[in-house]
Image (cartoon, helix red, strand yellow):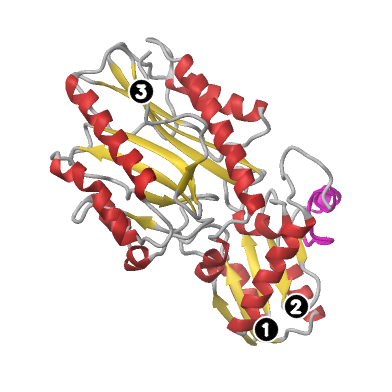
Amino acid sequence: MAVENDYFIPFSKEEYDRRYRMLREAMKEKGLDCLLIYGTQSYGGTDLGQINTMYLACYAAMIHCYVVLPLKGDPTLVISVPYHLENAKDLSVIQDVRASGFDPEIGVGQRLKELGLEKGNIGIVGPTWTWFNYTIPVEHHNYLTKMFPKINFQTVSSWFEQLRLVKSEEEIKFLERAGVMAGLAYEEIILATKPGVRYSDLSKIGEAVAARLGGRTPFPGHVGSTSMRNPTRAYPEFYPSHRTVNAGDLVQTETVVGYGGYFSKIYGAYFVGEPTKEYRDLFELAASVHDTAIKELKPGMTGRDAKRYVQPIKEAGYTTRDPLVLGWSTMNQPPQAGALDGSPASALEKPSDLDFVFRPGICVCILAWVVTPDMKKGIWVGSPCVFTKDGIKEFVPFPVSKMRIV
């Protein structure tokens, strides 16, 4: 197994055996002889560009890489940088690790020849979640299709993602740990908030908490504020600027912390000073929608069932920008369900999301995001959760729906 480290936290051998067994059984059923799982350029696994290679290899290459998973035979991890090879061998759970320079498709081709796979059916899995439906670089595609004209290459990213949706007990423990870390980071951000503090400094506080606890952040912690009496935004800054929080502001954050490549996310909102009546009402509405959904959604219900929980938002004269149920764990996986019809959120909700059946082990975010159509006023409350056999369990150890005033 992998050498202990702070970057790629390995699961047990039994967990990896389960993953390989599950995939190979599904490959056999689908008629696939091999999978090529691609990882795009990544900064040490923090930008989620290699979530699917990490799933099998417990390693994210600095440039790009592939996992070659044959139906029969040992898996291979092909990385780019030769002088990263020994470290990769130490950290990855895959035994056969190779470096082929900055053209990893050449190493992939060599491995396919060794496996005798000059013809057959090979599935290509893209580097990230299927919100972004891209797979491998065109240069790699051109090389492989020219080298292997008898291979039937097909994109199977969505199929691969569906196989990953129900999490194992070990995966859920990683997400629970990430949820605790995210909660602690969010708490320290709140405690550090005062008039004059910069958004960027609050974001760095969250990142520092994550690092101190052995967690990772996939992107800067979103932080932003707006005057409650003269609001201009309902979404925080993705890259926090040096703007400052002021007395009488609503502060919103999007705090994401991961452990072992599994990320939990809090959509937080709190007030600097006593909230105005409208913002108090907005928060209470969002909190009520969030808490009711967590209390009442159950396994066996569908994405279509989730839509009724956001109706109070419409009845109050507001709309939504994201669905109520956001698939989460490595990023925005399916489903994206529970949008108000005709709202901006409905553009994210596919027919398959409406028919999606919630099952134990499905990990999601429950997000109540109440906004005005012009996006100048709004508030959100959201927390990471898992469907259990009885309902929904939150990962954050305190209620994010509790009103906070600093």
Q: Which residue is mark 1?
A: 148
What is the C-alpha distance between the residues marked 1 and 3? 57 Å
Q: Mark 1 near mark 3, Cβ–Cβ under 8 Å?
A: no
Residue 11 screen position, x and y as percent: 73, 51
The amino acid type of the residue labelled 3 equals: Tyr
The amino acid type of the residue labelled 2 equals: Leu
Q: Mark 2 near mark 3, Cβ–Cβ under 8 Å?
A: no
- For label 2, count other residues whose C-alpha is less than 10 Å away and answer few (under 14), some (14-19) or many (20+): many
- For image coordinates 66% across by 57% down, the residue present is 55
Earlier-in-chain disc, 2 versus 1: 2
| Quadrant of the rendered image containing residue 281 | top left
Magenta highlight range: 82-101
Q: Nearer the viewer, residue 164 or 170?
A: 170
Residue 112, label in figure = 2
Earlier-in-chain disc, 1 versus 3: 1
Against 33, residue 285 (above or below) is above
Residue 348 lies within the magenta run: no
- For image coordinates 80% across by 76% down, the residue present is 73
Label 1 sits on a secondary structure element that is loop
Residue 95 screen position, x and y as percent: 84, 61
Against 148, residue 14 (above or below) is above
| Quadrant of the rendered image containing residue 298 | bottom left
Horizontal side of 336 relative to 1 (left or right) equals left
The amino acid type of the residue labelled 1 equals: Phe
Whether residue 79 is visible here, answered yes or no, is no
Residue 317 screen position, x and y as percent: 13, 40
Residue 270, label in figure = 3
Which marked residue is nearer to the observer: mark 1 or mark 3?
Answer: 3
Label 3 sits on a secondary structure element that is strand
Label 2 sits on a secondary structure element that is helix
Earlier-in-chain disc, 2 versus 3: 2
Q: Mark 2 near mark 1, Cβ–Cβ under 8 Å?
A: yes
